[in-house]
Amino acid sequence: MEEMLRMEHISKRFGSFYANKDVNLTVNRGEVLTILGENGAGKSTLMNILIGLYQPTEGKIFFKGKEERIDSPSQAVKLGIGMVHQHFMLVEAMTVFENIILGDKRSKGVFIDREARRREILELSERYGLDVELDKLITEIAVGAQQRVEILKALYHGAELLILDEPSAALTDIEAEGLFAIMHKLVDEGKSIIFISHKMREVLHISDRITILRAGEVVTTVKCSETDGQKLANLMIGRELSSSQYEKKQAGGQPVLKLDGVRYHEQSKHNGLAGITMEVRPGEIVGIAGVDGNGQTQLAQVITGVIAPEKGTLSLKGKQVSVFDPSDFIENNVSHVPEDRNLQGLVGDMSISDNLVLKATGSGRFSKGRGLLLRPKAIRSHALELAGEYDIRCTSVDQDVRSLSGGNQQKVILARELESGPELLVAVHPTRGLDIGATRFVHDQMIEARDKGVGILLISADFDEILEMSDRILVIFEGQIMGEYSGQNPPIQEISLAMTGK
Amino acid sequence: MNLSAISSIILATVRMCVPVLLIALAELYSERAGMVNIGLEGLAAIGALAGFMLTYTTGSTWVGILAGAAAGILVNMIYAFATVSLCANHTVYGMAINLLAPALASFIYRVAFGNGSSLMQVELMRGIGIPGLKDIPFLGPLLFDQTPMVYLTFALVIFTSVFFNRSKAGLNYKSVGEHPKAAATLGINVTGTKYLSCVICGALAGIGGAYLTTCYSTTYTEGIVSGRGFIALAAVIFGRWTGGGVLLACLFFGLCDALQIRLQVSSLGVPYQFFQMIPYVATVVVLAIAGSKKAGPKANGKPYRKEER
């Protein structure tokens, strides 16, 4: 088989930290090579080297048999390497058409020949089944369509090797199926694809070969037909992953949280609460199952004091809450792992150690005079301790939280929220976007907290996560609780139906 | 109001609008590449001085205009280097230009002409009537009997609109202000474009300043720019970051200026400062109404770091 790309002994260092170390890989024409690895294993760095955004510290790159120095993105585009980034590189204020022709070097002339360009794009779009509406603004089209624009853009710029960085992360199942169909078409036409993902099912479904990356180094490359999910997972995290069966518990005692007929923006089906009555007892995980956008966000906000219910009551440890203010809830030992970690959970431009004490700056441990003067030493040593305990992988605790991978950011939040000694933990999509290893870690920590007597409300759109973790399952639909089920041998069929409102 | 009053207001509007328009276009080119340059006031001040001095020494207003552009570019390179290469804060360095450049201009003026009270004067650029068009009754003499700088400025508005909406280069240029990383992945030279934008911005703002001393006032005085840099900043926002929009905004501010002069002359008994306030009050009002709705280029004012993780 003809070789398209070969990377030899590639290393990339940031300061003293090796993001990639002595990486070798090859991609043949007409195949899908998957690069599998946990968050922070160096997948994105490797790809950024390939497209000329980063320069490798060491190593050689051969493209179509010739050694090439890819010192700029334009060089990569010229060679025929295109990438669809995990966070799309689309200019939102421009139309689909403008985004595709952006940076066009092939056509001559000062002005944009709209007719000719449109014809070229439409031809490509038909050939590969990439259905897009050229005159819509990027903000007006769905995520799946934005992705098709990205692929079309790469093809328009002459890509023969296409890199797809976690392309299915933002897609619904149906959209993902469409993506795989497109990928099949591309390789049938002789293009090559580097597919980056950690969703095992997808990887096994679409790949020809799989290269596993761990801590910046290649572990091995295997043929897809000769492996299975368990083997891959073990190779990826470097140890045997025990099967994840958590023991289900039944809790008694006085509820830490009690909601009675809570209503908020009832008229809005997707962003309101229409009379929620429920409770969480110490030492149990209550899972809220439901399709995204059925009031989960508002439920979490009410329970953490961000918004006040319009009707109904909320009690913490048996005491009815009258003032809804997050700081009161924090004082009542309510911890919160929020839905969007970058928007709500962390201050990206602050260091790890500062983020870890955000809620406790007033305590005597970290400051003198109730927050008047901070104790930097105590804050730092606290951070070092937690970084070890929660396996936060960083070069230094003084590093900006923004520069951490998603999994490590989530660990920072979890460390802060669990260290504050909560009695109630509200965790919203706690493992969204996390890889297997980090997910397992978060789950283990939550189970451990439960066993210590913390009442946990788990809100997740990931049904598997709900089933795995919950001691009791409540189903939410259009702001209402549709039913309660035991976490022990839950009736999956019935719950699925309840999630659709039946 | 009679016809001659109206015609004199239109004439004044066009005259008042041009320097603001030049400076606003400077900012438009800057912000389209994501560079929020609030140092326009300073750039225009140094441009005004350079324009005056070179016109005074060579006797040619065109040399003065070019000198204004060169001075603007030179000073703006401080801002460019600090913000593009060193990723410094745009506002801080823009403000630094605003503090540095006018003071530098006054200093140079005193060194060159001394502290004396006699005002040095230059001869202003002459108007050129466009044959045919200038004979249109009423409007002809108002719009088509101006200095070449007026025509050039309006031509620049048209060019700007075409550049950003129709040309490939303009599309690439805009992408740098919207999403520099995306632009970089497509092989667009982000750093180069940002520097280019600073050159254009410095040149146009400098010319805007030089216009004041070559086409507007026969002499250089301290504070000759008198807030036009800030009004231009507002005009870009009001004009929604488009050539046509900026033109309309500047005409509106020009009209306010023309009106206030008219009112100053005709209303005795009211302190003139009250009328002088009008353009600035209009700016505040307009910004309050138009400012928030649609933010401009998305990566405006944000540093672009190449190997950011």
Image (cartoon, coloured by chain):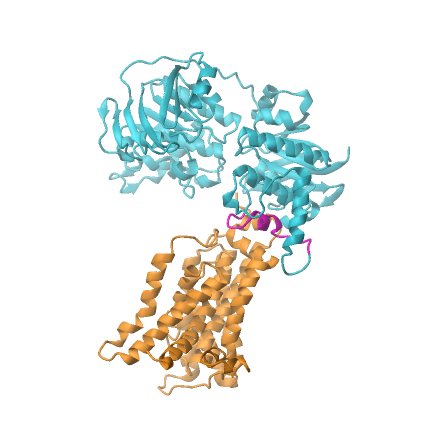
Chain colours: A cyan, B orange
The answer to whether A351 is drawn above or below residue B173 in the figure is: above
- Relative depth, front residue between B174 and A456: B174
Query: Can you say which quadrant of the picture contains the C terminus of chain A?
Result: top left
Q: Residue furthest right?
A: A1
From this view, report whether residue B70 is shown above or below residue A365: below
Q: Position of residue A384 (x, y in %)?
A: 42, 33
Answer left or right for A427 relative to A9.
Answer: left
Q: Is residue A437 above or below residue A125?
A: above
Q: Residue furthest bottom?
A: B118
Residue B238, image quadrant = bottom left
At x 52%, y 16%, the residue is A243
Task: Depth check: give the residue in front, A469 or A110.
Answer: A110
Residue at point 56% right, 39% down?
A145
Q: What is the x, y in percent for residue B68?
A: 49, 74
Total labels drawn: 0
Q: x, y (%) of residue B153?
A: 51, 72
Query: As drawn, is A78 to the left or to the right of B55?
Result: right
At horizontal 31% and vertical 21% (from top left) the residue drawn is A278
Quadrant of image for the N terminus of chain A: top right
Residue B277 drawn in magenta: no
Where residue B161 appears, as percent x and y from the top left, is 53, 63
Residue A341 at least partly seen = yes
Residue A94 shown in magenta: yes
Q: Quadrant of residue B121?
A: bottom left
Main SS of the magenta segment? loop
The residue lying toward the viewer, choosing from A358 and A3, is A3
Q: Which residues are magenta?
A: A91-107
Whether residue A81 is visible to the viewer of this picture, yes or no, is no
